[in-house]
Image: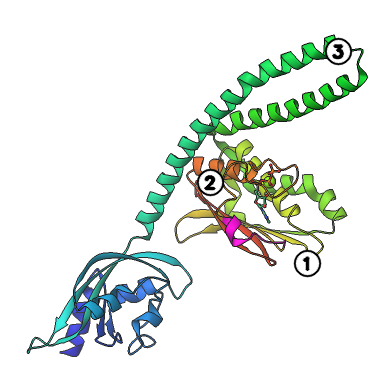
Amino acid sequence: MDSLYQTILNSLSSAMITVDVKGRIISANIPALRILGYDNDKNIIGKHIDEIIPANGSVNPFIESINKKKPLKRKEFTVINKKGEKLYLGITTSLIEDAKYDFTGVIGLMTDLTKIKNMQDKLKQKENLAILGEMTAVMAHEIKNPLTGIKFGIEYLKTILEDNQDAVESIELILNEIKQLERIARDMTSFARMPNISSEKFNLVQLIEDKIKIHRSEMKEKKININFNKCSDCINYYGDPYLLSEVFNNLLRNSIESFDNSCNKKDINIEIRFNDDNDTCLIIVKDTGIGIKEDNQKKIFIPFFTTKRGGTGLGLPTVQRIVIAHNGALTLNSKLGKGTTFIIELPSIVCNE
Ligand SMILES: Nc1ncnc2c1ncn2[C@@H]1O[C@H](COP(=O)(O)OP(=O)(O)OP(=O)(O)O)[C@@H](O)[C@H]1O
Ligand SMILES: [Mg+2]
């Protein structure tokens, strides 16, 4: 009977876990084990559900259902599984009662919503970027118009005050500041345009090698070690080489600028590999630089956010827009004092010929 019950559970396409009233796992079928990253149920049975599906700040739906003695409908729950993957699960629970209607545990059906959630996030990101682009274009336009008037006015003042050396010097200073504002307005205008992709087949490994070459002497002078881990499968890529070149230029520049005297090691590691699991091409840019404060990690993709003197803060927002325009994704992993990793995931339109 037991093995028939187990066979039925494993034949279900839905992931299912049952727990007793104390939250200890009684059974987990194969789809549930697969989602949670386990090969078999040996290390799961008898464990508390919070141990296997960590609560992560919110209340575990299994525990909520036990505490309230109520079934729950499609509770969304984020977990990091045994393989370290971040998953979004939809969990629906029902109560288990014995023949005397005594409450003996909870059954939970889990649906992996990760792919749907990631797609929704990407769409939202695209929408947000389009709105941001429109706002930036309007702001640039509003800055440019009065600026042109101010510039002409000041230049006229300069002609009538040309005999007054002090006044001319002050006017020159103002004109320099105007130039700076004009540059910002120009950057804003070019940022506002969603990159127009013009795709062609090109050698992705060569493109990254060329970017490294451009910065090699600077890295040598600053005693930065660079290592490029290539894979032969990902040589030919179909995308926009000029835009992607801008992506690697920005990421490499940021990594070069990420070292200060507190850094024991000055290593930049670039890796490119083909991810068979979801048919994507991964490009990983990792440095052992100063890292990014947790607070700032949310801000670095916002246009004009910079912690550098003379930085425009448009590097990463531009990188993000180009990656999204290629239907890819950009993720960040950074620890203050340890370093930063950017992972670019591009849909794999890799041609091997
Ligand atoms: N690899 C990195 N290590 C540490 N901090 C980083 C790294 N990459 C980006 N940052 C942080 O993110 C901020 C924004 O980066 P972004 O490239 O958008 O602009 P910027 O580098 O400041 O200016 P610009 O790219 O115009 O020269 C940086 O000022 C820095 O604080
Ligand atoms: Mg930058």
Q: How is the image coloured?
A: rainbow
Q: Residue at x 48, y 60 (%)?
A: 276
Q: Residue at x 43, y 48 (%)?
A: 122
Of the two numbered discs 3 and 1 in the rendering, the one whose residue sits closer to the viewer: 3
Q: Residues within 10 Å of mark 3 (few under 14, many from 20)?
A: some
Give whichever of 102, 214 is nearer the camera: 102
> Taking 270 as reference, is 83 above or below it?
below
CB-based contact (under 8 Å), mark 3 and mark 2: no
> Taking 6 as reference, is 304 above or below it?
above
Q: Secondary structure at mark 3?
A: loop
Instruction: Residue under label 3, please give it.
Output: 161
Q: Which residues are magenta?
A: 289-297
Quarter holding residue 101: bottom left
Residue 198 showing in the rendered view: no
The disc at residue 265 is 1
The disc at residue 208 is none
Q: Which quarter of the rendering shows the N terminus?
A: bottom left
Question: Label 1 sits on what residue type?
Answer: Lys
Measured as percent of width and height from the top left, residue 350 is found at 53, 47
Q: Residues within 10 Å of mark 2 (few under 14, many from 20)?
A: some
Of the two numbered discs 3 and 2 in the rendering, the one whose residue sits closer to the viewer: 3
The Cα atoms of the two marked residues, 3 and 2, are separated by 66 Å
Q: Secondary structure at mark 1?
A: loop
Q: Residues within 10 Å of mark 1 (few under 14, many from 20)?
A: some
Of the two numbered discs 1 and 2 in the rendering, the one whose residue sits closer to the viewer: 1
- Please indicate whether residue 319 sits to the left or right of residue 166 in the image: left
Instruction: Residue under label 2, please give it.
Output: 351
